[in-house]
Image: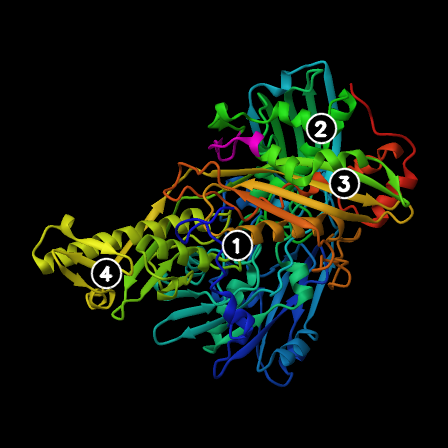
Amino acid sequence: MEPKSGLIGNYTPRVEDARLLRGTACFVDDLHIPGMLHAVMVRSPVAHGRIKSIDVAVAQAMPGVHAIYTGQDVARENKGIIPSLPIRLSSIPELTRFQQSAIAFEKVRYVGEPVAIVIADSAAQAEDAAGLVYADIDSLPAVVDWQTSARNESLLFELQGSNVAVTYTAQKGDALSAAGPYVRKETFKVQRHSAITMETRGLLAQWDKDKQRITVSGASKVPFFVRATLAAMMQLPLENVDMIEVDVGGGFGVRGEFYPEDYLVPFAARQLNRPIKWVEDRLENLLGTNHSREIECEIEVICERNGRVLALRAVMATDAGAYARSSLTTVPRNAAQFISGPYDIAHVHAASTVYMTNKCPIGSYRGPGRFEADFFRERIFDIAARELGIDPVAFRRLNLVKHAQMPYQLASINKPERLEKLDCGDYQVTLNRCLLEFGWDDKIALQGCLIDGKYHGIALGCFIEGGGAGVKETARIQLEDDGRITVYVGSTNLGQGMVTVMTLIASETLQVPMDRILVRHGSTTYLKEGFGSHHSRSTIMGGSAVFTVANALKIKIRQSAALQWGCAESDVQLLPGLIATAHGKTMSATALGQMRLQAEGEFSSTTNTYAYGTAAAHVTVDPGTGKVDLIDYFTVEDIGRVINPLTAKGQAIGAVVQGLGGVFLENLIYDENGQFLPGTLADYPMPTATDFPNIRAMELEDFPTPLNPLGVKGAGEGGIIPVGGLMANAVAAALSSLKVEPTSLPLTPTAVWELIHGQSSPSTGPT
């Protein structure tokens, strides 16, 4: 990438890294307050059952124990009502019937559901006492998959009469009536897995009895939503609740949503009038933090003989777990609406049904629904191309949305209705660039070859990434009395380099050095409202808000200087370093700072941006062990204007690695009784720094979006979206001579070995 004249667009080291590397960062567990107590959750050991009683007497008598609260205690303090966790995104009546209570009462519905909270002087004492809390639970038949759920033989919510929550329908044209000379149907499945963040969830709640005020440290992702939710649940005025963001060790969509603990710990803090800290251990993290991805899909493609896709039909089943939590809807809705990806398909119909089961509830996880949809679509496309005798590159090139078709209408989704359009771009450019940089023409000669006992496979896939979820983001910028700049923004920092990006935008807009800018973010004490970091929105929404208020500050500086000098505002010029000048007079940034000027504003948008790209991979497969080795991986994505290529590239490569973990390693498994099996990271393998060393990423900015003043698109999720389909296609290509056709993830060595040695016949051919 050619160097740019300004700061934006050049590789800039992350300004937030120094303190993290030096050990001076402050995470939740670094917080220690005099008089602080510790909380530990007592969790259900039963997947599905009725609570007969919870005996806390022995535990309550343990040394250091201050209190133990059960569902009965919470109900008693709330006039017989236990607050429910709200649905943050696309809430509809069909789902609110399945909301989770803040603590189990009368019934438990998954292993790990909180049934009590223990408060003690130390975490160790609370842990010991929690082990002595006895929950007498009558077991009920566990519902452990969507097929069992659909039969409604064991109901999670008896009053609802069904385990089937809702069916979303994405539609464009008339796919149900479409016909063509080639029709191919296949069923694919993505396993349950999720983001396992380096730092587990935690929070510290402090109750001020005199002011009737609760302060909660440990906020992330959407602090203002969590604040409003907690205020309503605790029946407090909004201004009496503060959410404080400290350092966060990873988010990826799962951190920062509203969980039972986000109510129970503040509840206990108010009851005892003491600061209380809770930090989940890794077992709790695996058990109770939102799961994701578990979708099965029957997908059908209708094509002309030349490979032109006429229609796409899909029927999906999402295993949603036991409750409808705050971000459940993104998974089944996105999987349906974006099943066509970056391709021009006139007729699309996808029905996506949500089934409740006795497992941990699902929610957003980096690229929610899109990772799954890409796996389904890219697999069926490779199958179709092979059976039609068409090169997979030519198949995709023929069907990609063309530049002249922009903006391009995607399928609409219902409940509630949402229309989406691809905003701008030339998808052929990223396809061609990927083929060139990957060295496709040279590598393709290895396709299917057995060399030194390993089969070689080459594949590619195309994808889109939505970003910039609305409706707005807020920011405030203040000129301090020493001439420095403080920027306040509603976006949160989850490790994605947001602080560096906001600093760059403010620095270039105001023409002041980066080291004179301080970015404060996330906490509800900084701004009247904010909307957080999710859906690849930080730079789009937060960055545009910072850009907006920085320009507003420049106007205020000119106005103030003009007033002081008695001249026209248009006569005042701003020089680099934030120096005002007019008619031979100058005013330094420090002098301007004495005026304590500030600007506050927002950037609003209800239209998403769409980054897009192509990825290619070269793998080898050992038929004796089933082990897949990644030889080369290249991804290119046009993300609109690039603010900092360093952070953008880091996002892309990190997302690819996360996707590879989901393809080859990770699986949140339950047994037939709904018991959770992978209780440690020894049982739930994740990628390490040495597992996938050959990953390359390129970011293009050929088509800045017209939808925001910076021209930026999302860049946080694109890397992960194509990984599932791409790697499955590469394995299928490697083992084509053995007629191996992967239809489900993960592709562990055992799974691949069984495909090689256990398949009796190739999968069903075209109809």
Instruction: Give the residues drawn in magenta, as a range.
Output: 412-429
Q: Nearer the viewer, mark 4 or mark 1?
A: 4
Q: Which residue is mark 1?
A: 647
Q: Is residue 568 above or below residue 134?
A: above
Seen at 47% across and 64% down, the residue is: 15
Q: Amino acid at mark 1?
A: Thr
Q: Quadrant of the C terminus?
A: top right
> Which residue has dot 2 on it?
392
Q: Secondary structure at mark 2?
A: helix
Q: Mark 3 — residue?
A: 744
Per the model, the C-alpha gap separating discs 4 and 3 is: 61 Å
Choose between 515 and 414: the one closer to the eye: 515
Q: Residues within 10 Å of mark 3 (few under 14, many from 20)?
A: some
Q: Dot 2: few (<14), some (14–19), or many (≥20) neighbours within 10 Å?
A: some
Q: Earlier in the sequence, mark 3 or mark 2?
A: 2
Q: Secondary structure at mark 4?
A: strand
| Nearest-to-viewer mark from 4 and 3 | 4
- Distance from disc 3 to disc 2, alpha carbons, whole Å, reads 20 Å
- Please tell me the numbered disc located at residue 579: 4
Mark 4 and mark 1 in contact? Answer it, CB < 8 Å: no
